Image (cartoon, rainbow, N blue to C red):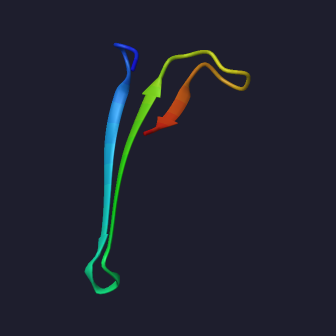
Amino acid sequence: MPPNSTIAYLVRHQPEKNMHRYYRLYVTPTPTLFSEFALVRE
């Protein structure tokens, strides 16, 4: 992960369905084809 990235942690729980989701996203100032930032999901 680049040093100047912004990290976001997303958590979703639905106990009645026994579902637990965890996401780690980060926005990095990497030039792409469409913009100057990239959103990366791990």
Q: Furthest-bottom residue in view? A: 16
| Relative vertical location of residue 41 with respect to residue 34 in this rendering, above or below | below
Q: Quadrant of residue 22?
A: bottom left
Image point 41% across, 32% down: which residue?
Answer: 26
Residue 5 percent across, percent down from the top left: 38, 21
Q: Furthest-front residue in view? A: 18
Q: Furthest-right residue in view? A: 33
Q: Quadrant of the N terminus?
A: top left
| Residue nearest the observer in this picture, 4 or 16 | 16
Residue 20 percent across, percent down from the top left: 31, 67
Residue 16 percent across, percent down from the top left: 29, 86
Q: How many marks?
A: 0
Image point 60% across, 19% down: which residue?
Answer: 36
- Left or right: where 42 falls relative to 31: left
| Relative vertical location of residue 42 with respect to residue 16 in this rendering, above or below | above
Image point 66% across, 20% down: which residue?
Answer: 32
Image point 35% across, 27% down: which residue?
Answer: 6
Q: Quadrant of the C terminus?
A: top left
| Relative vertical location of residue 20 with respect to residue 27 in this rendering, above or below | below
Residue 41 percent across, percent down from the top left: 47, 40
Q: Quadrant of residue 27?
A: top left
- Left or right: where 30 falls relative to 3: right
